[in-house]
Image: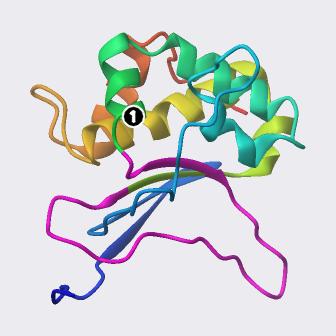
Amino acid sequence: MGTHSPKRCRVISGVRAFIVLSDAVATPGDRGLMPTEDHEIFSAYLQAFADCEPLRTRVLVVLRSLPDEVQRDFVEDPRFRVTMENHIPGKGWTIWMASPGPIGCGSRCVVLRPRLAERSEEFACYVIAHEFAHAYLRNGGWGDITDAEEAADALAASWGFSRPSNGP
């Protein structure tokens, strides 16, 4: 066993979702692709939403809409995960993350809130795409855009998911 640096974790809050980035590495088996009967490559990312329609469908719509390069980046990176927040009032919430690892090998975990199922489809898909953009950009900039929030908004818009003008 080698030595590991202390776990460094940032939680970046969004309106209805957030992404957790940490310097951690997932071990094999933490997230294996488990195809459904139609060999859906995104099935591992949908498991957390099995009992939360229409959120499951909305996550799938956004994943399928992403450019091939982004889909490959997510599917081929064992650090990428999508899960649902499990907050219990008065108790808090938990999220399981991989152990710390080398810098640059951090977890890429997108955590979505169940109430996105109650929002308009346009707003929910925007939030999901925005959070996926953070994961893809590793919470960094995009092109000339250095602000992480602006970069995630711009990238999500380039994927066809602009911030709705009418809100949630």
Answer left or right for 118 relative to 143.
right
- At a point 53% along the width and 24% down the height, the residue shown is 163
Answer left or right for 163 relative to 145.
right
Which of 72 and 160 lies nearest the eye of the viewer?
72
Helix, strand or loop: magenta stretch: loop
Residue type marked 1? Phe
Answer whether residue 166 is visible to the viewer in this image.
Answer: no
Answer left or right for 98 relative to 53.
left
Q: In the rendered view of the protein, which quadrant contains the N terminus?
A: bottom left
**Residue 166 painted magenta:** no
- On the image, the x and y values in percent for residue 71 come to 41, 22
**Residue 80 painted magenta:** yes
Q: Which residue is mark 1?
A: 74
- On the image, the x and y values in percent for residue 21 come to 36, 61
Q: In the rendered view of the protein, which quadrant contains the C terminus?
A: top right
Q: Secondary structure at mark 1?
A: helix
- At a point 60% along the width and 71% down the height, the residue shown is 95
Instruction: Please identify the quarter of the rendering in which residue 94 is found.
Output: bottom right
Boundaries of the magenta span = 78-107
- At a point 29% along the width and 77% down the height, the residue shown is 100
- On the image, the x and y values in percent for residue 151 come to 28, 33
- At a point 28% along the width and 78% down the height, the residue shown is 8
Dot 1, crowdedness within 10 Å: few (<14), some or many (≥20)? many
